[in-house]
Image: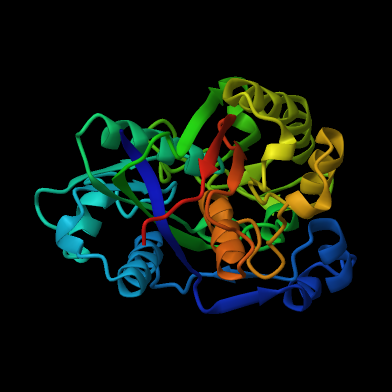
Amino acid sequence: MRVAAIQALEHHLPERRLKNDELAKLYPDWSAQKIFDKTGIRERRVVAPDEFASDLGAAAAEKLFARTGIDRATVDLLVYCTQSPDYFLPTTACILQERLGLPTTTAAFDYNLGCSAFPYGLAMIRGLIETGAASTALLVMAETYSRFIHPMDRSVRTLFGDAASAVLVTATEREAPTLGPFVLGTDGKGANNLIVKRGGIRQPIGTEPLVETTDNSGNVRTEANLYMNGPAILEFTIRRIPAVFKELLARAEVTLSDVRWVIMHQANEYMLRYLQKKIGIPDEKFAVHLEHCGNTVSSTIPIVLQHLVKEGQVKRDDLLLTLGFGVGYSWGANLIRWSPDR
């Protein structure tokens, strides 16, 4: 049967490192060690003033082409995820198609999701490949949240880092699917808990002056900056995500013992460890990898997966469970049977 299978992954980080020591100078009551203790992050990467999400995405894709030797002329689908597009229009995927030298027979489109982007992207690509609409797909996810963050808002600046990832998915002949099942969901009641209010069509920048406000914790921001209601995000996560985890296992008719790795969105280590304990995932199955890159939004899961593959901790036919959750609210989970052809 014709199925979609992941063949390879790559990621790219900008050069600039924003370390906890630098942040501690701005937030005197938070030492570098305290930031690490609260987040599990020692440094995060930040784009240069003339560097954009599409630059990171193109770099990740070029790394993938260089390592795999895949003929880019065979790529017939490019799916690009970002919440920091180059322009309102055209879609950045069209720009990347030309920049990467992909053929004009390549279908290309953007989708706007944050931390659940990886399962959503794989679900769309699987559908297009297994219905015959595509054969060789490139999934690129790139984010530059640093552009939305006020420098004096430690609630988000200590967490988020810029990054991009690229995933090669192709049609192959297998006896059983290698991607799925999927559990996807949305709860738009949480939209205002992780948001940049100004800058879109509903509330454009320039119609009214931007005013800096300071919350009870001393975090400074304007409505053109990223706002995160941390307690509400935590409450949503611990309420919803364990149920999504159980639903996926039930839908697949497998148990946790069948899964080699559980790879969740790397929000912060506190949240990850809370979920690990609540669900009952043993350490040897639970992946945490954000110390030197931070929360990279859409790229956290593929960055962790590439790290595990590179370290030889993922073997052929291993069953992997990925689970993303966050802005929207949006969530997605899926299983991956790791069996690349190349």
Occupied quadrant, residue 303: bottom right
Q: Residue at x 47, y 41 (%)?
A: 208
Residue 318 to residue 247: above or below? below
On-image quarter of the N terminus = top left
On-image quarter of the C terminus = bottom left
The image position of residue 17, as x and y in percent, is 61, 77
Q: Residue at x 79, y 45 (%)?
A: 271
Please indicate whether residue 96 sits to the left or right of residue 124 in the image.
Answer: left
Q: Residue at x 21, y 40 (%)?
A: 134
- Which residue is most to the front? 175
- Which residue is most to the left? 104
The image position of residue 200, as x and y in percent, is 40, 39
Q: Residue at x 51, y 79 (%)?
A: 15
Query: Can you see residue 185?
Result: yes
Please indicate whether residue 122 sits to the left or right of residue 239 in the image.
Answer: left
Pick whichever, 196 or 279, lies toward us: 279
Count of numbered labels shown in the rendering: 0
Residue 190 to residue 42: above or below? above
Query: Can you see residue 229?
Result: no
Pick whichever, 106 or 222, lies toward us: 106
Colouring used for the render: rainbow
Residue 118 to residue 150: above or below? above
The image position of residue 41, as x and y in percent, is 74, 64
The image position of residue 123, as x and y in percent, is 41, 34
Please indicate whether residue 220 sits to the left or right of residue 130 in the image.
Answer: right
Please indicate whether residue 184 sits to the left or right of residue 175 in the image.
Answer: right
Pick whichever, 288 or 82, lies toward us: 288
